[in-house]
Image: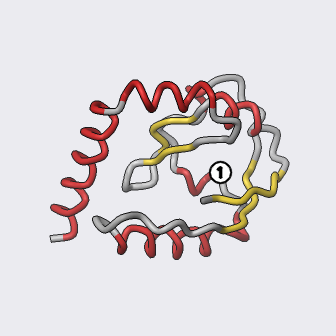
């Protein structure tokens, strides 16, 4: 049953991006914050230029398709898994924002403190 729910949610997300592509594109180019989107399995499907630069990467190809948890410092990964499970359990209701502080692993191996929302 959960797998069916996840598949439906993936289709809903795809439909949202297709219908609101113009809005999403505008936000992508203008938002001053780092944006990292994942699918429901935690694979990164989108990053904006701010996120790429913040992490010290040269382009999105080095990030897209990777497990988002691999970019979170080891001491925060368990917390991130728990919070992700909380978020997924709230679907398909309107998303509740769970603000959490984590450390992101940059391309050079340094750790950057961030607030994820």
How crowded is the residue under tag 1: few (<14 C-alpha within 10 Å), some, or many (20+)? some
Q: Position of residue 9 (x, y in %)?
A: 26, 54
The residue drawn where x is 63% and y is 35% is: 31
Quadrant of residue 54 within the rendered picture: top right
Quadrant of residue 24 within the rendered picture: top left
The residue drawn where x is 71% and y is 23% is: 58
Q: With 72 as the anchor, is 8 left or right in this view?
A: left
Q: Position of residue 70 (x, y in %)?
A: 61, 53
Q: Is residue 68 above or below residue 53?
A: below
The residue drawn where x is 30% and y is 40% is: 16
Q: Is residue 49 above or below residue 91?
A: above
Q: Which residue is mark 1?
A: 71
Label 1 secondary element: helix
Colouring chosen for the image of the structure: secondary structure
Task: Report the number of numbered marks.
Answer: 1
Q: Is residue 90 above or below residue 31?
A: below
The residue drawn where x is 66% and y is 28% is: 49
Q: Quadrant of the C terminus?
A: bottom right
Task: Pick the residue in front: 88 or 70.
Answer: 88
Q: Position of residue 109 (x, y in %)?
A: 81, 46
Task: Pick the residue in front: 29 or 37.
Answer: 29
Q: Quadrant of the N terminus?
A: bottom left
Task: Pick the residue in front: 75 or 35.
Answer: 35
Q: With 91 as the anchor, is 29 left or right in this view?
A: right
Q: Position of residue 103 (x, y in %)?
A: 75, 59
Q: With 85 as the anchor, is 7 left or right in this view?
A: left
């Amino acid at each position: 049953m959960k797998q069916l729910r996840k598949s439906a949610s993936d289709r809903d997300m795809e439909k949202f991006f297709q219908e609101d592509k113009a809005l999403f594109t505008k936000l992508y180019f203008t938002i001053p914050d780092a944006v990292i989107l994942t699918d429901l399995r935690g694979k990164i499907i989108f990053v904006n230029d701010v996120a790429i630069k913040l992490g010290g990467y040269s382009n999105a190809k080095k990030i897209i398709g990777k497990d988002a948890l691999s970019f979170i410092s080891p001491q925060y990964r368990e917390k991130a898994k728990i919070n992700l499970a909380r978020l997924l359990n709230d679907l398909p209701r309107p998303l509740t924002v769970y603000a959490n502080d984590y450390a992101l692993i940059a391309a050079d191996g340094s750790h950057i403190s961030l607030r994820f929302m």
